[in-house]
Image (cartoon, rainbow, N blue to C red):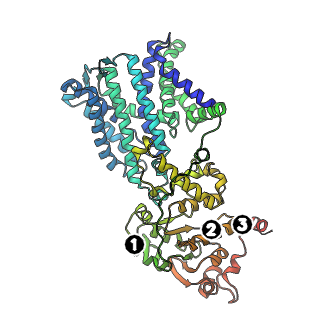
Amino acid sequence: MRSRLIAGAALLVLAFLPWIPGIPAFWITQMNYIGLYSLVVLGLVLLTGVGGLTSFGQSAFVGLGAYSTAWLTTAVGVSPWLGLLAGLLLTCLVAYGLGLITLRLSGHYLPLCTLAWCLALYYLYGNLDFLGRYDGIAGIPPISLGDWSLGASESMYVLIWLALLLALWATHNLLDSRSGRAIRALRSGAMAESFGVDLAHYKVVIFVYAALLGSVSGWLYAHMQRAVSPSPFGLGYGIEYLFMAVVGGAGSVWGAVVGAATILLVKDQLQNVLPKLVGTGINLDLLVFGVLMILVLQFARDGLWPWLARLGHWLGGGPDTQAQKAVRNAAPAADLPRRALPAAGSLVLEVDQVRKEFGGLVAVNDISFSLRAGEIMGLIGPNGAGKSTTFNLISGVLALSAGQVRFMGERIDGQSAHEIARRGLVRSFQHVQLLPDMTVLDNVALGAHLRSQAGVMSAALRLDRASEASLMQEAARQLQRVGLGDVMDRPAGSLPLGRQRIVEIARALCGDPILLLLDEPAAGLRFQEKQALATVLDQLRQEGMSLLLVEHDMDFVMKLTDHLLVMDFGTRLAEGIPADIRHDPAVLEAYLGGVDEDWDVSAAAQTPPPADSAIQQKAHS
C-alpha cells in the first residue's frame, strides 16, 4: 500500500506539473524533451538492454517520424494525425526491411551496420529537395483535438507524457508475458530455440517495436518545434540515446526515463554552473560530463534505476513476484492442451548413420540407434565420446554432415531447433542454461512457450491474462512435481547448481514432450536428489513418455534405463540392455583401460570422484 501511495503521488504531481504555481516555463520545456528522449530510449531498453541487440541508429527512425508528418502536413495539408499514421507505416516498412538484413549479423558487425544505415538516412534527409535539404521544413502546424490546439508547451506536455506512460505500460506488459520471456531469452541462443522460440522472428519484432517508439517521438518533436532539419537525427544523437539507456539501466523499463532525465539535466546544469566557476573562456562541459558518467557507471554498473528500485523497495515493501501473484490470485486457470503420447512400444526416434565433421575432426561417426515409446535409453561413454554432439544433431542445434534423423516417422534433420521442438522433442543441456535474473517460475514457464499462441500485440495491451495464468499454473505444477515448489519466486541464479538442473528438467516437462532428451541430469545432485529424480523419470516412463539420457553416473544409469548405447571417440562401441553392457569387455576397456572380467562398470561407478566423496558419504550416512 505504501509503495502504491508513493507511485500515485508521483503520477499526480507529474500530471499537474504545468499548472503548479511558480513552475518556470523552462522546466516544462525540459520535461517535454525528457519525455521525447525517453520514448526513444525505451525502445533501446527493449532492443539492447533486454534483447542484447546493440543499435546506434535509433535517431534515424526519429527522423522518419518527424519528416513524414512534416512533409505531409505542410506540402499536402493533411491532418497531423494522418501524419502520425503515415510515419508509423513508413517506419514499420523501413525497420522491417533493415531488420531482416541487419539482424542476421552478430558480434561487432551488428552495431557497425546500424551506424551505416543511420548515416545513410541522415544524409538522405539532408539531400532531398522536397525535404528542404539541410534547411529542413518549417511551418509545421500544431496538433489539434477538434477545436483544441495543442500548440502551447503545457498542452504538448500532456500529450508527450501521456504517450510515454502508455508506452511504458505497454512495454511492461510485453515483458511480463509469454513473448516477454522469449525476448529475455534471446541472448541464450540455442536454449531458447530448443523450447520453440523463433529467435529471428522476435529479433525483428523488438527491432520494429523500438523503431516505432522512435517514430512517435519524432512526430511529437516535429509538431512541438514546428520545424525539422537533419541535425537532430544524426549519429551523435543515436549514440546519446544508447548512452541514456546504459546510464538509466538498460534492462529496466523505468531506466529509460531515469537515463534520459539524468543526461539532459546534468548537461544543462553543467552549462549553467561551469562558466561561473572557471569562466566563459574555457569549455569544460564535455570533459566534466564524461568524468561524471564514468563515475556513475563505475559505482552503478547496472544503471541508476536498479539502485533507485532497491531504495523504493526499502521504502515501500519488497518486489512483487509472479509466484506471489499466483498465491494471491488462487483461482484455478484453464489447463493447457496436452499431446497424445504414442502407443507403448511404437517407434519414436530413429537415428540412421548420423555423422558430424568439424573440418578434419569426426565428432560423431555414423551412429545409428532407435528409441521406442515408454522407454528410457542411456547414451553413455567417456568424456569426449560425442554424446552431447549427438544430442545437438538430434535436436537441430547442429546440422548433420551425413545421415538421417526421424521423429515419429518423419525426417527432422535439416529443420531448425524451434521447428523440432514444435513436434514434441524437448531437451536440456550439458551446462545449465537458465536466465539467472528471472524467477524460477518464469524460467520454467519459458518451456511452455509453444503451448500458447498469445502474441506481442495482445501481450502489450494485456489481453493475454487468461493464457498467461494457464502458463503459470502449468509451470507451478511442474515445479511441485520435481520438488521445487518452495523456490518458485526466487531468482534462478540464486539456486545451487544441482537445483538449477532440476529447474531445467521442470522447464523441459513444461513443454509437454513426446521425447525428452536430458544431458547429464544427475550432475551435481546429492544422493537423495538423484533418487528423487530417478523416481520422477520412472513415473514419466510409466505415463508413456520416451527419454534419452546422457549421464556419467553409471549406477544411476544402470538402475534406470531399459537400453544403453556406448560411444567412444564418436563411434558406436556397444549396445544392449544394462546387464549385458556392464560386463562387455570393450566397455570395460574404454572406461577402465582393461581389467579382470569379474569387474563391472557399476562397481567402478560406485567409487565416487574425489570432489564429490564428502557429499556422497554424508548422503549415504
Residue 305 visible within the image: yes
Residue 153 screen position, x and y as percent: 39, 17
Q: Earlier in the sequence, mark 2 or mark 1?
A: 1
Q: Which residue is mark 1?
A: 401
Q: Amino acid at mark 1?
A: Ser
Q: Secondary structure at mark 1?
A: loop
Res 312 → quadrant? top right
Residue at the image point whose x is 48% and y is 35% from the top: 245
Residue 329 screen position, x and y as percent: 58, 45
Residue at the image point whose x is 38% and y is 52% from the top: 201
Q: Secondary structure at mark 2?
A: helix
Q: Secondary structure at mark 3?
A: helix
Taking the view exactly as shown, the residue that stands out farthest to the top is 22
Res 217 → quadrant? top left
Taking the view exactly as shown, the residue that stands out farthest to the bottom is 597
Where the C terminus falls, by quadrant? bottom right
Q: Which residue is mark 2?
A: 536
Q: Which residue is mark 3?
A: 528
Q: Residues within 10 Å of mark 2 (few under 14, many from 20)?
A: some
Where the N terminus falls, by quadrant? top right
Q: Nearer the viewer, residue 527 or 3?
A: 3
